[in-house]
Image (tube, rainbow, N blue to C red):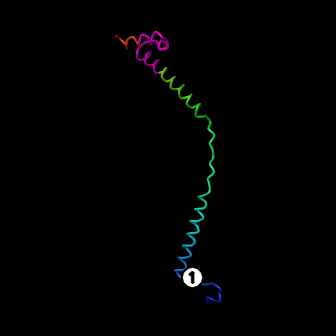
Amino acid sequence: MEQETGKKSLSREELRKAQKNKASQQEEITATQEEKPKKYKFRIRLIPIWLRLIILVIVMAVAVVAGAMFGYGVLGGGNPMDVLEKETWQHILDLVNKQ
């Protein structure tokens, strides 16, 4: 009956060998695909890194001045705009460096 249909039935061993061959072929295909160099997409930044650094320095300077004004004006009970005067800082340095 097998000869009449033209199909040959495979034994379990032959089926296992065929499955191993398919698996090894798949591994070879994936290995060759991995060897190809990948194309990298370069990201164009909206704000360049050098500009980010400048913005960071400016924000830090504003935070220091705002903190000094808050500390001197609100916590210290003085006029917040006096923080920006040279005489105020000279007075603070004289108090700190008292000899």
- How far from the left and from the top, in percent, is residue 36? 62, 57
- 3 or 37: nearer the viewer: 37
> For mark 1, what is the residue?
10
Q: Is residue 46 above or below residue 59?
A: below
Q: Is residue 39 left or right of residue 58?
A: right
- 74 or 69: nearer the viewer: 69
Tell which residue pokes out farthest to the left in this image.
99
- Magenta range: 67-92
Q: Is residue 56 above or below residue 32?
A: above
Q: Is residue 68 left or right of residue 32?
A: left
Amino acid beneath label 1:
Leu
Q: Quadrant of the N terminus?
A: bottom right
The image quadrant of residue 6 is: bottom right
Please tell me whether the stretch drawn in magenta is mainly helix, strand or loop. Answer: helix
**Numbered circles on residues, count:** 1
- 38 or 13: nearer the viewer: 38
- Tell me, yes or no, whether the highlighted magenta stretch contains residue 14: no
Q: Is residue 83 left or right of residue 96?
A: right
- Tell me, yes or no, whether the highlighted magenta stretch contains residue 89: yes
What residue appears at the point 42 percent right and 10 percent down from the top-left corner? 91
Q: Quadrant of the C terminus?
A: top left
Q: Is residue 80 above or below residue 44?
A: above
- How far from the left and from the top, in percent, is residue 35? 60, 58
- How far from the left and from the top, in percent, is residue 47? 61, 34
- How far from the left and from the top, in percent, is residue 24? 56, 69
- 63 or 27: nearer the viewer: 27
Crowding near the residue tagged with mark 1, few <14, some 14–19, many ≥20 C-alpha atoms within 10 Å: few
What residue appears at the point 63 percent right and 51 percent down from the top-left corner? 39
What residue appears at the point 46 percent right and 9 percent down from the top-left corner? 87
The image quadrant of residue 21 is: bottom right
- Element class at badge 1: loop
